[in-house]
Image (cartoon, rainbow, N blue to C red):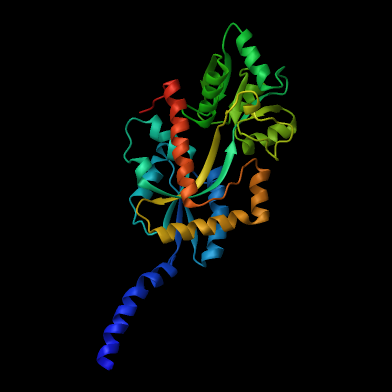
Amino acid sequence: MRKLLVPLMAVAMAFAAPVARADNYPAEGIRIVVPYAAGGIADVLARLVGARMEAAFKQPVIVENRAGANGTIAQQFVAGVKPDGHTLLLGNTSTQVVNAHLYTKLPINIAKAFQPIGLIAASPMLLVVSAASPANTVADVLAAARASAVPLNFGSAGNGSASHLSLVLLSTQGKVALNHVPYKGTAQIAPDLIGGRLDAYFDVPITAMSLLKSGKLKAIGVASRDAQPALPGVPPIAATLPDFEMTTWLGLFGPAGMPRERVERLNRTLVSILADPAFRQQLIDQGNEVRPGSAADFEAFIAKEMTRIGEVIRAAGIKLD
């Protein structure tokens, strides 16, 4: 009997071992790599989510900032680590979609190097004008563009930024000429808009909110399919230009090759975090859409974004090296 039990126990342990290893994840701390400097929107969101993950996993979760090269430095680092789920990337529209179309030479294949885990939040772009502008609707802006002898000046955060792609989409769908004025960020765009040196620009709600509330700027359209609770009275641009949509989103990624059960556990934890009423409302109040879903949902979403944004970039002929 003893001779019979030993091999049976060995077989049982062999089958139980993978389950035990999966159940023990995470066996150590988790690192979330942010492709931008500390203090920005992505960094703040990573720390908010990280603190809640730490409570859920009973393991430390640290945020590590690896800024530079439009996110490529952070991407290359995460793509090269062991795919065990202990190092993650806070990716966004620019790093995971736009860069793949914008740059002709990249050190990694973005579409194949990462495992999508879950979408955290999506922030629709806002069409913003000076409070003194006679334009009060998207239709007013399009009419002014058609009537003007010279193209209207639209500011952006730089070539290939979400604000740039938004104005390209507006120009294409509205069939109007718009002059792109790229900046090295957003700090000087609002002052130039208020001062009359720009006619309009697209911004994310969280950075535009204070100037909108102060009455210095006004939002006349939101680039989402539906109206946003945090932006009462601001109609979707899609009401004037059907299917107009441009959002900046943030989500969690791991390196390609992660075990499926770890991807699913991270996703379930993220969905649970986003279901917390207080946290969810905090994101909504900042002008975000909260769209929790499975890892497969996130993969399908990214595939659609790749196609949709790729078409906008190709139509505009935007390329960077």
Is 238 situated above or below 29? Answer: above
Q: Quadrant of residue 128?
A: top right
Q: Looking at the picture, how far across and down is residue 235, in whole percent?
A: 69, 30
- Residue 139: x, y in percent? 66, 19
Residue 99 location, x and y as percent?
Answer: 41, 34
Q: Nearer the viewer, residue 240 or 316?
A: 240
Residue at point 39%, 45% (across, down)? 75
Q: Is residue 127 left or right of residue 161?
A: right
| Vertical comparison of 277 with 244: above or below | below
For the residue pair 147 and 212, the one nearer the viewer reads as 147
The answer to whether 80 appears left or right of 318 in the picture is left
- Residue 36 appears anywhere in the view: no
Q: Nearer the viewer, residue 284 or 47?
A: 284
The residue furthest bottom is: 1
Assign the C terminus to one quadrant of the image. Answer: top left
Q: Is residue 226 left or right of residue 16?
A: right
Residue at the extreme left of the image, as rendered: 3
Q: Which residue is at 63% across, 16% downward?
A: 142
x, y percent for residue 261? 42, 61
Quadrant for the N terminus in the image = bottom left
Q: Residue drawn at (49%, 60%), measured in percent from left and top? A: 61
Q: Quadrant of residue 171?
A: top right
Residue under the image location 43 percent in, 46 percent down: 66
Q: Residue furthest top?
A: 149
In the rendered image, which quarter is residue 127 located in? Answer: top right
Residue 112 visible in the picture: yes
